[in-house]
Image (cartoon, rainbow, N blue to C red):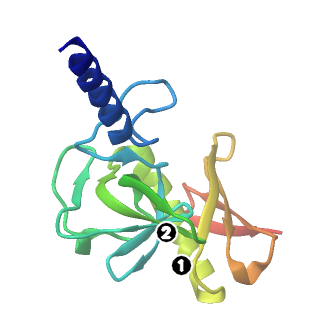
Amino acid sequence: MKKFFIVCLLASFLLIACGRNSFDLMANGKASNHEKGVSGPTGFITAIEGKRVLIGDIFYTTNKDTIIIDSDGNRFLFSDLELGMKVQPFHSGEIRESFPAQADAVQLKIFVDETSQKESIAVSAMLKDVLDRYEKPIILKKIHFLPEKNAFEMEVFSFSLGSKPLKYIYYINEAKLEEIK
């Protein structure tokens, strides 16, 4: 009977261990929030194709169960999504290797704070210029605020550019976009 108990206990541990995937633990060792899925990197929507959105270098596929909310908790429809929106994606845990990579979206959280809105305006202005001149997909590699200029500097990549990214600066006060050469 004791052997049977030990075998059952070991089998239970094995099943529990096998049931966890590599995304169940975050870098800090804490369990991820399974209600929202696995957190992907916060970024900006640079493409919308069918039911997919490109955020960073990952296309997130949505379905009828994907939850789309803003940072205040308000619900959105997929049709409400726009290019340039700042989004925190949560996915199912599997990222399929391709370029851009692909994942299934569990939740998309849209940031609506003042800073995120300003960033989104800058990214939207940049996308309007880039999408007219270069082939898709456009991947936003970096965005950072330049307080001395009250502007955002952005770096973007497209396959049609080769290995050299484009750099832009968006001046908030003037609502002016310039390509940095």
**Disc 2 element:** helix
In the rendered image, residue 129, in percent from the top left (x then y), is placed at: 60, 79
For the point 32% across and 77% down, the residue is 51
Q: What residue type is labelled 1?
A: Lys
Residue 124 is marked as 2
For the point 76% across and 68% down, the residue is 165
Q: Image height check: is 55 above or below 146?
A: below
In the rendered image, residue 17, in percent from the top left (x then y), is placed at: 37, 33
In the rendered image, residue 159, in percent from the top left (x then y), is placed at: 70, 79
* Residue at numbered disc 1: 128
For the point 37% across and 39% down, the residue is 18
In the rendered image, residue 98, in percent from the top left (x then y), is placed at: 58, 71
Q: Image height check: is 99 above or below 105?
A: below
Q: Which amino acid does label 2 sit on?
A: Ser
For the point 28% across and 17% down, the residue is 6
The picture quadrant where one finds residue 153 is bottom right
The picture quadrant where one finds residue 48 is bottom left
Q: In this view, does 34 lie to the left or right of 42?
A: left
**Disc 1 element:** helix
The residues bearing labels 1 and 2 have C-alpha atoms spaced at a distance of 6 Å
The picture quadrant where one finds residue 39 is top left
Residue 75 is marked as none
Q: Is residue 9 left or right of residue 32?
A: left
Mark 2 Cα within 10 Å, few/some/many (few <14, many 20+)? some
* Circles 1 and 2: CB atoms closer than 8 Å: yes
Q: Which of 8 and 101 is in front in this view?
A: 8
**Is the N terminus in the top left, top right, bottom left or bottom right quadrant?**
top left
**Is the C terminus in the top left, top right, bottom left or bottom right quadrant?**
bottom right
